[in-house]
Image (cartoon, helix red, strand yellow):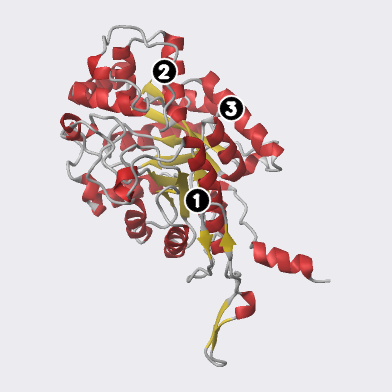
Amino acid sequence: MRRNDEMKLGLYLVQAGYHEGAWRDPSVPANGGVDVDYYAHVAALAESAAFHFVFLADTPSVPEQDPATIARVSRNDAFEPLTLLSALSSRTQHIGLVATATTTYHQPYHLARMLASLDHLSRGRAAWNIVTSGNKFEASNFGESALPDHDTRYVRAREFVEVVKGLWDTWEDDAFIRDKQSGIFADTTKLHLLDHLGDYLSVRGPLNIARPPQGYPVLIQAGASDAGIRFAAELGEVVFTAAPSLEHGKAYYATLKEKARALGRRDDQVLVMPGIVPIVGRTKQEASEKLQKLQSYTHVDVQIGAADRSLGFVTDLGSMNLDSLVPETLPQTNFIQSRQKVLLDLAVRQKLTWRQLIRLVSDSRGHLMVVGTPDEIANTMVDTFEQRAADGFNVMPATFPSELKDFVELVVPELRRRGKFRSKYSGQTLRENLGLKRPLNRFTQAGARSRP
């Protein structure tokens, strides 16, 4: 199926930048994680370049375990996504607002209500990045000793998402008539109880807010394990992934689209957007020096902690010979299995030592990293797009706001010169800007089918 010739761009919004050493860069505000004006400035910069959305990752825990690592990372002092994006909804006009929220430790009614509220506040710009908890320290924050089994988390997540979508449908689009003359505020013939009773959840409904402007906020997923790909193919409208090479990206893209097609979904309704970490220089040397400076800011404890976490806490890198080769196999993790596999495959293919892999994780965590001139970065992005390894990219600047500014001022014009990125917003809602259909209300459809 032919797709639009223009790629989609999202911005991975973190307080300092994607590189582990970003917060120590002199250009980065040290308190950015809890400064709403700083986030508003970064979001406005992305909006000025017509990015499709800003994306906030999240984990409801401190993900590191070693005090020496916790002392040196900046990621544990930042806003909760839905709270921050609600604030940004009044300080932006067009850009989409993507909140990460786990199905493992949320309740569907609360989350459906919060996401619907964000969609109303933003006039149709909300999206939900659906995750299952993947950090071992989350469980003990919610009264459990360990995370549920990996595949069990996905089974519960599928039911959770269906409940949330059902709650968004409990009021038909025109149910709230607000007629002062008659005194009727809501047409209760257009109100529907959900009455869900499943294997994991029991939810009556209805939701106590009108159906979201988009019908549903855009559903975003990042599944890359076997269970995750099945989940993404079934429910994801935008799918994030880590694709460190063109070959990896093409294989993932083809697999996901094929599985989605088998479920009756159209290619243009399942958008694949891998991460890219661009380090932009006016010369290759300038870009390389930027990366070297960030690497010099990153303590070895932070590097090892990030690698241990990304590999799923199945190794003790602090006690290993770091100059030995990474083995072909590692014990399977109950945490983020797909990231472990991406990193291990990359290490084996490139014959990396543990020291080299640890540095790679610190730099990019297994995402595509391009260090070079605007022309080189644009060429890589266009090639990846044209070879059906991506429908767009989740841009992960190494530092904020300077690397985002360089990307907007130097790379975006190159993409536009090649006819691969838009110059303005084309729709009112995030769905419209992404080319995604507005979902019909299940109860309205059921009623239409039952009428003679």
Q: Nearer the viewer, mark 1 or mark 2?
A: 2
Query: How far is the residue under mark 1 from the one under mark 3?
Result: 22 Å
Quadrant of image for the C terminus: bottom right
Q: Nearer the viewer, mark 2 or mark 3?
A: 2
Foreground: 242 or 342?
Answer: 342
Residue 422 visible in this rendered orientation of the protein = no
Crowd tier of the residue under label 1, counting other residues whose Cα lies within 10 Å: few below 14, some 14–19, many 20 or above: some
Q: Secondary structure at mark 2?
A: loop
Label number found at residue 330: 2
Percent of width and height locating residue 380: 48, 23
The correct choice, above or below, for 142 with respect to 25 in the image is below
Q: Nearer the viewer, mark 1 or mark 3?
A: 3
Q: Which residue is mark 3?
A: 386
Residue 231 visible in this rendered orientation of the protein = yes
**In the drawing, does residue 33 fall left or right of residue 175?**
left
| Nearer-N-terminus badge (1/3) | 3
Query: How far is the residue under mark 2 from the one under mark 3?
Result: 34 Å
Name which residue type carries label 2.
Answer: Leu
Name which residue type carries label 3.
Answer: Glu
* Quadrant assignment, res 398: top left
| Nearer-N-terminus badge (2/3) | 2
Label number found at residue 316: none
Please report contact status of discs 2 and 3: CB closer than 8 Å, yes or no. no
Q: Which residue is mark 1?
A: 425
Percent of width and height locating residue 274: 48, 32
Foreground: 270 or 385?
Answer: 270
* Quadrant assignment, res 439: bottom right
Q: Secondary structure at mark 3?
A: helix
Foreground: 314 or 368?
Answer: 314
Quadrant of image for the N terminus: top right
Percent of width and height locating residue 41: 29, 49
Percent of width and height locating residue 320: 26, 13
